[in-house]
Amino acid sequence: MTDTKPEEDSPHPDQEFVWTFRGYRLRPGEFTTAMVHFFRAEISRANIWRTRLDATTNWAVVTTGAAITIAFNPTGYHGVIILNTLLITLFLFIEARRYRYYELWSYRVRLMETDFFASMLVPPFHPAPDWAESLAENLLHPDFPISIWEAFGRRFRRNYLWIYIILAIAWVLKLWLLMPGPVDSWKAFLDSASMGALPGWIVFLVGALFYAILFLVGLITATLHQATGEVLPRYIQDIKVTGPDIFGSEKTEDRHAWFRQTRRSKQLMAFIITGRSKEVGQAILDEMKRGVTSLQGVGMYTGKQHSVLMCALTVTEVPHLKSLVSETDSNAFVIVSPAQEVLGRGFLPLKQKEN
């Protein structure tokens, strides 16, 4: 655990502290040390899940080789390849789930790479306004950065596409050349594809439909680019660069800056019904640095007037708000509801930037 010192023992009273808790304050150097340890822990997590991704791919490759070897024996049965295709699909689904967990840790790593370490190296030497909030929200309320469809499609295109193609070719060669001997017509090919009571044309049709669905999913999900652990283009602005080309003539080209994809934090609205509105409001202003608006309300049951404090905040600030209200007025009534959009200082800018 990072060493901290009490407030009264600080050697630099005017030094700006980045974190306080129960009378202890965390200095910038100690904060950096804690972030470095946290970064190493998330790298370790991501590596573990990356290894698990490789494990399912290895299972798929090994079972495919074994199934083809068995099927191509003189007494082999083409149904082994079909059963292996279903098993490979199960491996693909398992790998897609694991890929979502890998992306969860990778998202945190990318946040620290782009807005903590990179901001130390590139002027103006400060992180994006939402990076700390995004990281804290992901720690308090973990959420998969990508959908199961994107994970399924991405792993299919990267690894399993070639495995499915090899299985399809092996199945066709088995029926056309080796079962029980070479066939010389399309009808004979379909007859050799039969499985028990199922005629060959049904087996062929179901297989073609299955492959069509797989390739369609892989094609549709190719437009999804939420994965943070992949090297994907992120275009935020065009930079005009003019200079001579290889022939000596002037040439202008666009260079695109790469940045992480931002995610809007969950925004909330809190209503606090209290008889000590001044004390509660002042505590929120001093401790949370959030604006508070006081409204007047009347309790319909008692007929008494009460103050209703309205405060916009983010999901990571809810525990702090509850603690402040509880310490100031334990009889207060707190309502926290989601807000569609909060515009203004401390949140999204009210005036949108022109393109």
Image (cartoon, grey):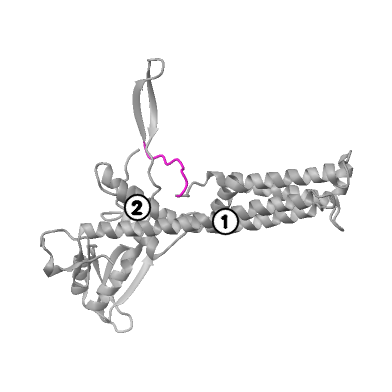
For residue 57, side relative to residue 270 (left or right): right
User: In which quarter of the view is residue 239 placed?
Assistant: top left
Instruction: Please state the horizontal and vertical placement of residue 346, each as a whole percent of the image.
Output: 27, 56
Magenta stretch encompasses residue 78: no
Instruction: Please state the horizontal and vertical placement of residue 8, each as a whole percent of the image.
Output: 11, 69
Q: Nearer the viewer, residue 351 or 50?
A: 50
- Farthest-out residue, top: 248
Figure disc tally: 2
First in residue order: circle 1 vs circle 2:
1
Q: Residue at x 81, y 50 (%)?
A: 73
Q: Main secondary structure of the magenta part?
A: loop
| Quadrant into which the C terminus falls | top left
Magenta stretch encompasses residue 230: yes
- Farthest-out residue, bottom: 302
For residue 199, side relative to residue 329 (left or right): right
Per the rendering, the mark at residue 112 is 2
Per the rendering, the mark at residue 266 is none
For residue 75, side relative to residue 158 (left or right): right
The residue indicated by pointer 1 is 55
Q: How many residues crowd around disc 1 within 10 Å: few (fewer than 14), some, or many (20 or more)? A: some
